[in-house]
Every structure is written in structure tokens, then in C-alpha cells.
Amino acid sequence: MTRKATPNSTIEELEGDRWPEPKFDSHLVRECNRLRKLQLRLFTVENLRILLGQDIGSRYLVPIALERLEADPFVAGDFYPGDLLCSVLSLPRVFWNAHPELKTRVAAVAARAINNDEVPAKAIRKAHDQFLAHG
């Protein structure tokens, strides 16, 4: 059952799956667990980059990420300009096959980024090549 996302929803609520507190002491594991409990309206670019990089809550987070990327393809989390776009492009083929309308949007954003001569886009080009290889 797919739940309708609202700005006050959390990934945990939308997926109907409560994760136990992590037993593995890793910053990434703890952060992913924490972010699943965060209201969608509070997500920063870095929060989106982290969860999408792990393919957690992607069907709810990609539309939010795309709004930000369509405004600025090079919007950045903590790593480099375009790191959010790279995380989105790196989602598995099965996600894109299930969401062709989102795939079209991200392909347009990536094309804009790659064709921009002002910002180095080597990482984006690499992620885009892998995205295209998915078919």
C-alpha cells in the first residue's frame, strides 16, 4: 500500500516500518535511522543526499530532490557541487523503471548540468553515464 506523502510525513510513517535502534555503531547507520524519523519538510540537501545514496525512502525523496535540482542542478550537500544529483542518478535501475516520469525529469536536470561550462561536472558525467547504461 502506497501512502500519500505530506510535508509532515516521515519515511518511517510512509513505509509503515519502524527500524530498531541501530546496534552497529556507524555514523551512517545512525544518521539513516534518524533521518527516517524526520519530517520530509525538514530535509536538507545533505539529508536527501545521504538517504538517496543508500536508496532509503527514494520514492518519497526523489520528488523533493528533483524540485531542488530543477532549481539548481549543482545544489550541494556536504561534499561537492552536484553531489545530490550524483546520488539521484546512482539509484538502481529498478527504481527508474518503476518511475519513468521521474527518470525523464532527472535526465533533463543531468543534461543541463553536463552542458554547463561554468561548473566542473566530472562526477556528474560519470554518474550520468552509469544512469544511461541502465537503459
Image (spheres, rainbow, N blue to C red):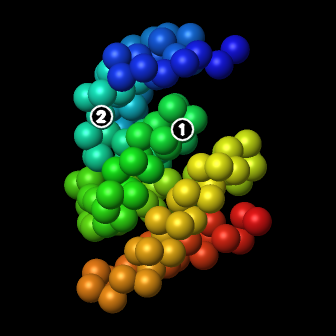
Q: Amino acid at mark 1?
A: Ser
* Residue 129 rendering spot, x and y as whole percentages: 60, 76
Residue at x-position 36% and y-position 64%: 73
Residue 122: mark in rendering: none
- Judge whether residue 34 can be spotted in this image: no
In the picture, the quarter occupied by the C terminus is bottom right
Residue at x-position 27% and y-position 66%: 80
Judged from the image, the secondary structure of the residue bearing numbered disc 2 is loop
On the rendered structure, is 17 left or right of 27?
right
* Quadrant housing residue 119: bottom left
Residue holding disc 2: 43
In the rendered structure, are the residues bearing label 2 and label 1 in contact, judged by CB atoms less than 8 Å apart?
Answer: no
Residue 58: mark in rendering: 1
* Residue 68 rendering spot, x and y as whole percentages: 34, 50
Residue at x-position 41% and y-position 74%: 113
Q: Nearer the viewer, residue 35 or 14?
A: 14
Give the alpha-carbon distance from disc 2 to disc 1, as whole Å: 13 Å
* Quadrant housing residue 34: top left
